Image (cartoon, helix red, strand yellow):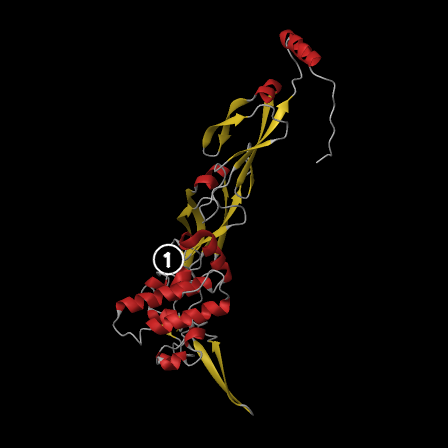
Amino acid sequence: MGDFYETLGVSKNADAREIKSAYRKVAMKYHPDKNPGDTVAEEKFKEAAEAYSVLSDNQKRAQYDQFGHAAFNNQGGGGGGFHHMDLNDIFDHFGDIFGSSGFSDFFGGSRRGRRSGPARGSDLKITISLTLEEIFSGVDKTVKIKRFEHCASCDGSGAAAGSQPMVCPACEGAGEVRQVQRSFLGQIVNVQPCHQCHGNGQVISNPCRPCSGKGVEKKTATVALEIPAGVSSGNYMTRPGEGNHSGKGGAPGDLIIYFEEKDHPLFTRDGIDIYLNCWIQYPHAVFGTSIEVPTLAGKVNLKVPAGIRSGQVLRLRGKGMQELNRGRQGDQLVRINIETPQKVSKKAKVLMENLSEELTDKVNFEKFR
């Protein structure tokens, strides 16, 4: 699956109008009515629909810009999984595109009217706590969630064993009812979901007992997650189709995973940079030294230059956090503090007294920062 922006031929700064216009052009070029029997054109048509489904949705677009295709890795593609959908489903999703500006009429789109049907299942939201070490390298997680799935007794139909749903007599299976009203402006057609079947097109005369005719029951499911490196609190990713099932043929909702960063006992994170405090002895500050410093990638050696001042910061380049979905690596910054001993041995006391005699009594002041 290629880059969604490249698929539609737009820049990453394109606004909603440009994205919609670009999708219309690509869809017109590869429309199945214009390319009958051309499987390559059909695949490009589906790719364009998948790209538009993500880039036309502000939330999905933000996730894609952060995570890339990993944000929707449940079905190996983008937000809607259009590679696995019937072409009619694509027309149903984007009726406003194919039904505007003569686009539908040009391709005989009247044969692909929008269909009513069962409502989509609701989304589920969970929060996962991650350590800095897990965020640094990325991690695979397995979570257990409770969600509504198809009832095992009726296989999601809502009808008792041995019976079948019936075509709704009120809407004759259309799932919607049309009311025509006359006014001085002409005829006004009001289309609403059928009140008897609630848009399903079918009614159940003998409901399944375990699920009370709903077609779903609550179950525990295990979901594997691939969390990329560099996420932070407030970021989230979506697993399409892993939410609640609606039953009776409706598409399942999504699972939305929010991330929460755990406090670390040693490191402080600021974006892609990591901060650490370090205390050294006074002689090491005077003469310089080499110390072993912990990082999220393991211990490394850091050279402390002679004459360093307390509070001075040294930088370990490339030892910070990876920038999400971009590959740029942050730094680790080590603030050097000079430790003042509270108790010293007799030998050390003599040495320090001798040192004190060698030093001047000069005192410097500077502005408090």
For residue 78, above or below residue 172: above
- The answer to whether any part of residue 300 appears in the image is yes
Task: Place residue 353 in its image quadrant.
Answer: top right
The 10 Å Cα crowd at callout 1, few under 14, some 14 to 19, many 20 or more, is many
Disc 1, SS: loop
Quadrant where the N terminus sits is bottom left
For residue 315, above or below residue 93: above
Viewer-side residue, 240 vs 221: 240
Q: Is residue 264 left or right of residue 94?
A: right
How many numbered discs sit on the rendered protein?
A: 1
Viewer-side residue, 155 vs 369: 369
The residue that appears at 42% across and 65% down in the rendered structure is: 52
- The answer to whether any part of residue 80 appears in the image is no
What percent of the width, then of the height, locates residue 339? Answer: 63, 22
Quadrant where the C terminus sits is top right
Which residue extends farthest bottom?
Answer: 184
The residue that appears at 48% across and 34% down in the rendered structure is: 296
The residue that appears at 47% across and 65% down in the rendered structure is: 56
What percent of the width, then of the height, locates residue 313? Answer: 59, 32
Q: Amino acid at mark 1?
A: Gly
Which residue extends farthest left?
Answer: 37
Viewer-side residue, 88 vs 14: 14
Dot 1 corresponds to which residue? 77
What percent of the width, then of the height, locates residue 178? Answer: 46, 82
Task: Place residue 72 in its image quadrant.
Answer: bottom left
What percent of the width, then of the height, locates residue 228? Answer: 43, 46
For residue 313, above or below residue 179: above
